């Protein structure tokens, strides 16, 4: 139940902070741009998680330490960056999309890592 509440809170915070970019994106979607941003952010996020896992594996870390290192390098707090970008670049709302996508992709990848680590 706590995970579900946390997920809802993250989605609400992302939506609240991204409200400047969403109307323009929904009104006039540029599908190529959205796909490019999603692909790049997904690759960056997956690379961060993979870097943590590979680094821990290279140094022969125990499974628990490997998981900690994976999350330590893979997870980061982008909320401050989202708020700062929304304030500083209010006239360029599409600048927020990479941060929004990264936040959403990061949570998805973290869930996948959790399922894989649980095995």
Image (tube, rainbow, N blue to C red):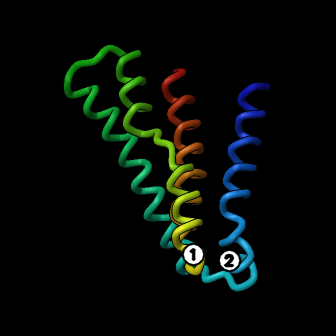
Give the residue at the far front of this rendering: 88
Tell me the residue that label 2 is attached to.
Answer: 25
Question: Residue 68 appears at what percent x and percent y?
Answer: 41, 23
The vertical placement of 8 against 62, above or below, is: below
Residue 21's place in the image compared with 110, above or below, is below
Image quarter (top left, top right, bottom left or bottom right) of the N terminus: top right
| Image coords of residue 115 (percent x, y) | 57, 29
Asked if the residue under mark 1 is in contact with the one under mark 2, i.e. CB atoms within 8 Å, the reply is yes
Up/down of 68 relative to 53, above or below: above
Secondary element at tag 2: helix
Residue 101 figure quarter: bottom right
**What residue is drawn where x is 60% and y is 79%?**
31
Q: Residue 29 in the image: x percent, y percent?
A: 67, 81
The residues tagged by marks 2 and 1 sit, at their Cα atoms, a distance apart of 8 Å
Q: Residues within 10 Å of mark 1 (few under 14, many from 20)?
A: some
Residue 8's label in the rendered image is none
Residue in the image at 34% along x and 32% along y: 53
First in residue order: circle 2 vs circle 1: 2
Q: Between tags 2 and 1, which lies in front?
A: 1
Residue 56: image location, x then y, percent: 28, 26
Which residue in the structure is indicated by mark 1? Answer: 94
Residue at screen point 41% across, 56% down: 43
Looking at the rendered structure, the secondary structure element under dot 1 is: helix
């Amino acid at each position: 139940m706590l995970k579900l509440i946390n997920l809802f809170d993250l989605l609400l915070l992302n939506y609240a902070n991204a409200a400047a970019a969403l109307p323009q994106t929904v009104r006039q979607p540029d599908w190529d741009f959205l796909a490019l941003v999603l692909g790049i952010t997904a690759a960056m996020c997956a690379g961060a998680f993979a870097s943590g896992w590979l680094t821990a594996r290279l140094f022969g870390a125990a499974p628990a330490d490997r998981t900690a290192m994976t999350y330590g390098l893979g997870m980061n707090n982008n909320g401050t960056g989202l708020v700062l970008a929304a304030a500083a670049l209010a006239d360029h709302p599409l600048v927020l999309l990479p941060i929004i996508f990264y936040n959403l992709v990061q949570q998805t990848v973290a869930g996948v890592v959790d399922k894989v680590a649980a095995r």
